């Protein structure tokens, strides 16, 4: 998709989702001009993912695994509003709970247990250091 500033990624997100971005309380933003954005936070040993905008989930998958490993997380979870059964099946996750989100919308919580040891935590640190050198 090429480089986009945050406003352009936000517009892309809102056009595709049909929703306005609402940042949930306590979540952190990770942003890349080339890859989009994802909101995340750590809850104990769980790395929670919220809203995101990207066309490169391979990139964010590696980033989330590395981030989870660096924080000592053992699983990743996200809330899904549309077609949670399909989403879980396609991504290898499991629906662990159904309920409502912080805005009262119906959601399903999907979890991926045992974050794969695909990346060593040092690789995440190295990527962050390189990113800092470029700024």
Image (tube, rainbow, N blue to C red):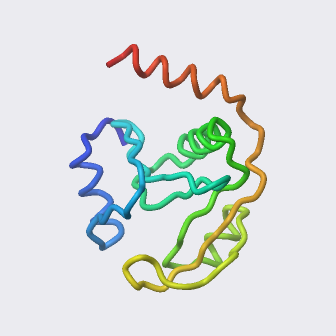
Residue farthest to the left, as pictured? 7
Quadrant where the image shows the N terminus: top left
The C terminus is located in which quarter?
A: top left
Considering every residue shown, the one lying at the far top of the view is: 133
Position of residue 67 relative to residue 77, above or below, is: above
Say which of 126 and 17 sits in front: 126
Image coords of residue 42 (percent x, y)? 55, 52
In this view, 1 is above or below 107? above
Image location (x, y in percent) of residue 110: 64, 69
Between 31 and 36, the one lying in front of the other is: 31
Q: Quadrant of residue 21?
A: bottom left
Q: Is residue 99 left or right of residue 89?
A: left
The residue sitting at 58% across, 45% down in the picture is: 64
Residue 59: percent from left, percent from top: 54, 40
Residue 15 lies, in percent from the top left, at 28, 66
Q: Is residue 21 left or right of residue 112?
A: left
* Residue at image point 27% right, 55% down: 10
Number of numbered tags placed on the structure image: 0
Q: Residue at x 49, y 78 (%)?
A: 81
User: Residue 119 vs residue 14: left or right?
Assistant: right
Residue at 71% x, 60% y: name it: 112
């Amino acid at each position: 998709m090429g480089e986009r500033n945050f406003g352009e990624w936000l517009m892309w997100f809102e056009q595709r989702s049909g929703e306005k971005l609402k940042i949930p309380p306590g979540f952190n933003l990770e942003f890349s001009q080339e890859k989009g954005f994802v909101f995340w936070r750590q809850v104990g040993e769980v790395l929670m993912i919220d809203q995101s905008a990207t066309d490169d989930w391979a990139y964010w998958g590696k980033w989330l695994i590395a981030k989870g490993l660096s924080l000592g997380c053992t699983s990743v979870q996200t809330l899904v509003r549309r077609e949670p059964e399909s989403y879980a099946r396609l991504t290898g996750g499991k629906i662990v709970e159904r309920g409502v989100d912080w805005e009262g919308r119906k959601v399903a919580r999907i979890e991926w247990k045992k974050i794969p040891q695909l990346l060593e935590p040092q690789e995440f640190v190295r990527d962050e250091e390189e990113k800092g050198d470029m700024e």
